[in-house]
Image (tube, rainbow, N blue to C red):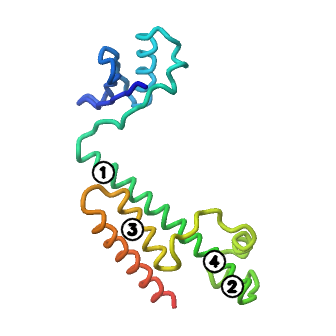
Amino acid sequence: MYHGNFVLDESGVWLAQIEEIPQVHTFGRTLGKARQYLADALALWLDVPTELLKDRIEYRPAALPPALLNAVHEAKAAREIAEGATATASDLMTTAARALTEEAKLSLRDASELLGISHQRVQQLVVHGNGSLAVTGSGRLGIAQDVARSLKEFLPGGEKEELGVIAAGVALGLAIAWTQTHD
């Protein structure tokens, strides 16, 4: 296995090098091109077809200044939290649609009016579900656990337990506020 390293130089060009063979190095205007050129350079050095190396090169994360790495981590964390919240909301919507139509015996149109979605979407939720993963817990606690897990996994720095407590508090606060404004 070979390892490719990438560094962004001050001119905006990606410098690429094979860790195990420092003589194999190249550059590219984009990260994708630098990867391609690095594979080509390694193939030339080893005198083998590039296709044979595709699964033998592991590309390391690009080396960036700490401020940029922090921005990348924060953006990924925010995206992951948003995706988790969306999945949780979808699971809760499915649960509510099923409860309204199956337990309360409401029509699709009445359930749609109560949920604020179309009756067609209610039918989809009742018949097929939403296809996402189940909520970790139930209700507000599940949302809090999902947000806490996302924060602990994706935010750099800080004690993971502290981040979990903060995330749980934020999620519960949001859930309570939402409940109070929608009751």
Q: Which secondary structure, mark 3? A: helix
Which amino acid type is shown beneath numbered disc 1?
Ala
Q: Residue at x 54, y 71 (%)?
A: 89
What label does residue 95 carry, if any? 4
Q: Residues within 10 Å of mark 4 (few under 14, many from 20)?
A: some
Residue 88 image offset from top left, x and y in percent: 53, 69
Q: Which secondary structure, mark 1? A: helix
Reading the image, the residue beneath label 3 is 148
Mark whose residue sits in front, 2 or 3: 3
Q: Residue at x 51, y 17 (%)?
A: 50
Distance from Cα at disc 2 to Cα at disc 3: 29 Å
Q: In this rendered view, identify the residue nearer to me: 68 or 88.
A: 88
Mark whose residue sits in front, 4 or 1: 4
Which amino acid type is shown beneath numbered disc 2?
Leu
Q: Which secondary structure, mark 4? A: helix
**Disc nearer the start of the sequence (4/3):** 4
Reading the image, the residue beneath label 1 is 71
Residue 50 vertical placement versus 145 (above, below): above
Residue 36 vertical placement versus 132 (above, below): above
Q: Quadrant of the N terminus?
A: top left
Residue 139 image offset from top left, x and y in percent: 52, 79
Reading the image, the residue beneath label 2 is 100
Q: In this rendered view, identify the residue nearer to me: 109 or 163.
A: 163
Asked if residue 17 shows in the view, the reply is no
Q: Residues within 10 Å of mark 2 (few under 14, many from 20)?
A: many
